Image (cartoon, rainbow, N blue to C red):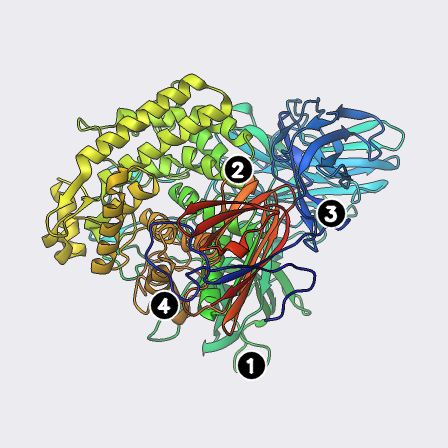
Amino acid sequence: MARPPGYPVYHCAMHGLVHEQDVNDSTLIPSTLSLFLSASSNSTTMRIINAKVDGYAEQLGVDRSDITFSWAYDDDEGVSSNVEQTAWRITVGTDASLAVSSWDSGVVESSGSLGVEYRGQLEPLTRYFWRVEAHFNDGSTLTSDISTFVTGKLDSPWAGKWVGNNTSDPFYLRRQWSATKPVKQAFTVVSGLGHFVFHLNGRKVSDHEMDPGWTNYRKVVPYVLFDVTDEIRQGPNAFGVEVANGWYHGKAGGRFFQLEATGIVPKLSPNVEELEYQTFGDVLPAIVEVHVQYEDGTTEVVATDDTTWRVCESATTLANIFGSEDFDARKEPVGWTLPTFDDTTWETAQAIPVDRAPLGALTAQIQPVAVKKVYEPISITQLGVGKLIVDMGQNMAGMLEISVRGASGEVVKFSMAEKLRADNGDIEVRVDGDHLIQWGDCNVRHEYTLRGDDKGEQWKQQFSYYGGRYVRVDNARLPDDESSAFPELLAIRAHYITIKAPVIGKFSSSDQRLNDVYRLVTEAVDSNLQSTHTDCPCYEKAAWLEASQIMAPSIMFHRDVSFLYAKIFADIRADQWHAGDRDFYNGKLAQYQKEGFIGSRAPVYEIKWTSIPPGDIWDIPPWGSCIAIGPHWHHLYYGNDKVVADNYEAAKAYTKYLGSRATAEGLIEHGLGDWGNQNVHEMAKANVETATYYLDLAIIRDFAKIVGNDADAAEYGKQAETVRDNYVTRLMEFDTTTKRWGFRAKADPRLSFRLINAIFSFKAWLRGPGMTPISQAMPLMLDMVPAERAEDVLATLRHTLDTDGYSCGELSLPYVINVLRKHGYNQDILDNLVVAKEHPSYYRFCEHGETSLPEYFIDNARSRNHDMMGSILQWFYNGLAGLEPTKPGFKQFTVRPWLGKMLTNINVEYMSASGRISVVATRSGTSAIVDLVVPPNTRCSAQLDRVLPAGRVATWNSVEVAEGRSEFDLGSGRHQFIISV
């Protein structure tokens, strides 16, 4: 292999590229290596990137004064060597020249660039400009481009009133108004519940979908700020708002609205009927303020009232949040959003009295949902006269768009589904899958009533989204089909929606199977990243909290979800129970109304279950613990201390609640254990819940140090040690058969659980609880195992996997995967889980034609678009590239690329909070090149095996961490390794 020009050569020998050895160390990296290091000086190619306020770029609607700034560096050519920031200066002002500053930090000596606190004042509805000047260790400086943010209402009073048409049906709201002078700047703040679409002068403003985001409307009502400076013109203008139901006042319209279990468990709780969905208000509301600043410096506010705004019923006659929408085009007032429209026949909007208005505090929504991609059909099949089956080629969170032509009053129906029936090719509306519990039909359908336009007419779903790949079209024909008189289907498209958060991770490899699995999981992630993190886009749309914490590292490698996760934590805090909170369930949930309690979902729109045979489904420790574990991951990946401060007290309150639920043995035994495990006996409730409790305590101990509370740090550290020691005493046993220590899954004594166990797995029931994977993996990963027994417990984990296969639920998956890869078993993960022929297997889903990850490791799962089992996603980064943060925000990180037996290439790129990291490993014959890019102002630890004396590099520090193994401390720049394989 030719030597790259300008690079000195160094040699070292390493193992693991051809085959992976069984070692108890996480430093495996490729075999027999020759190392090249860049020695280039700093270059003008370096620039400041990702200038953000509270983790989000170009914010519209900053609604808190304690904001933080963050930035990073990039060098497209990777030639800026060993660059470190030594100081920064931030300037903030209300004009682009920054001539008059609202805050000038002065030069602050610091290498930090994440979560820098703002120390100035903020005014409401004001555009601010800011930039950062950075100083470096070589004496150079760099100045960023100007960035902007716009404040929201902050604490200023609202001029607008909540208005509507005094019904719970969708409506149109409009106001015609004239700007009498040239406009310099204009902002509009809007909310409409459940969802709204805002129009100005005949067009929809923004690319947002599903505004506003989902919250507990009794606590928080989101509003959206739009910059309409370019849309408002001198002279007549028209503001239009469409409002429909959403979760605020949900309506089924005779179609699927929520899951109702049947079959062997007809009712899962005696209170199920009373505790399911409850509306948040009896009339749909909207509120608008348009803030205009004229060129002459004067201002004007146009706000909703009950005198000048007009309202009429909407052509949207049903807006079922689970995906069904009906639209009667005959009722649509053509041109109603234009200034020339005559609204004299419309009614005057009615003000909504305070006692009927939304209860929650109006708070700015920052991060919207938007269209990711528009899909055209890959096939359209005629199933019968007037019946078409459309395959969009992708299971997604979708919004349908159609174009039809036909006579006025004719109705075309569109039904969506995730799969087709094997017997007749029709869509499958049953959601049972291979489950004993029968969930019934998921009847999601649009009904479009034609206006009768000879040129055709278009409509797009606006107030809900469906989950699915297939569409059955009833009462329609293709244009070239003259066998019937049904309306013509001229076009059909699916708009795939997800949170508007940048994709920051990229992966590819020489093995197409891995590429397919990566896409399978990321599609499920994208479908479930909405204004909350949902379980699935089809059947529940519920913000179950466990997936947000167990999937956090995977999701944070894929997209920049800093702001979305901050919103998730705010939703949890809003729903956390505190003394004095109003009881909206009339005492029926009294058992949960205890200080600090967090339910299993947030926000919550229905409480269908209080218990099921495996356990309490509303009080589940790993779900509620999202308030501690989630901020832990957020802080580690994004490096902003603010997330710790924001959630510190809530995490403490919840952990105190958990402690109050401990048994006489000091264990936490309520909850569901390893949910999703097909071997029910392996759910190991006491093991899972108590280890989660220990993790919460350890996290709060670390958080206390960050917020500067030494007393809390000492107290929570002591509590964590007590729980750990008790966990080992109560649950660790010596297995006389294998002659090894391990953790036994504690049996659930309840007869109901044992019967369910027998139904699901008679063999497992006969065997009873034993040494299960989750019981070993959690304490190993959390450092709960006594050092002298750790090797035994790892061997026990390996034995359980060899004996029973990768029997894992959603809780155990990330622990099993991470323990195995940290101890050198990447090949086992690849062979036995990623590309295995039989389940559990990710690639088996790809072979069976799935385009997103299903709910469970079975061929016919209930849901075909769940991400809760997607923890393998992080392995593509921390397993194959060995990429892990060792300091918050990837200020310091490790890299240990792995090619295994068969891979000839892996290519990983990650835009971390501190800059772009790239790891590429390419094999050619008997050698390979590893190309690593370390961003400026960061350091990378490259752990290399058996470094030869000639391979010790004078320009980098290296420490021998084990016999024949060295750890290299690398600064910024491009680094190349030549590997003999």
| Image position, residue 864 (x, y; %) | 39, 60
**Disc 1 designates what residue?**
481
Q: Residues within 10 Å of mark 2 (few under 14, many from 20)?
A: many
**Mark toward the start of the polypeptide (1 vs 4):** 1
| Label 1 – label 4 distance at C-alpha | 39 Å
| Label 2 – label 4 distance at C-alpha | 36 Å
| Label 1 – label 3 distance at C-alpha | 67 Å
Q: Nearer the observer, disc 2 or disc 4?
A: 2
| Image position, residue 923 (x, y; %) | 52, 69
Give the secondary structure at mark 1.
Answer: loop
Q: What is the quadrant of the N terminus in the image?
A: bottom right
Residue type at tag 3 = Asn
| Image position, residue 43 (x, y; %) | 75, 49
Residue type at tag 1 = Asp
**Disc 2 designates what residue?**
888
**Disc 4 designates what residue?**
844
Question: Is 975 drawn above or below residue 961 in the view shown?
Answer: below
**Mark toward the start of the polypeptide (3 vs 4):** 3
Question: Which residue occupies the foreground of this view, 453 or 524?
Answer: 524
**Disc 3 designates what residue?**
42
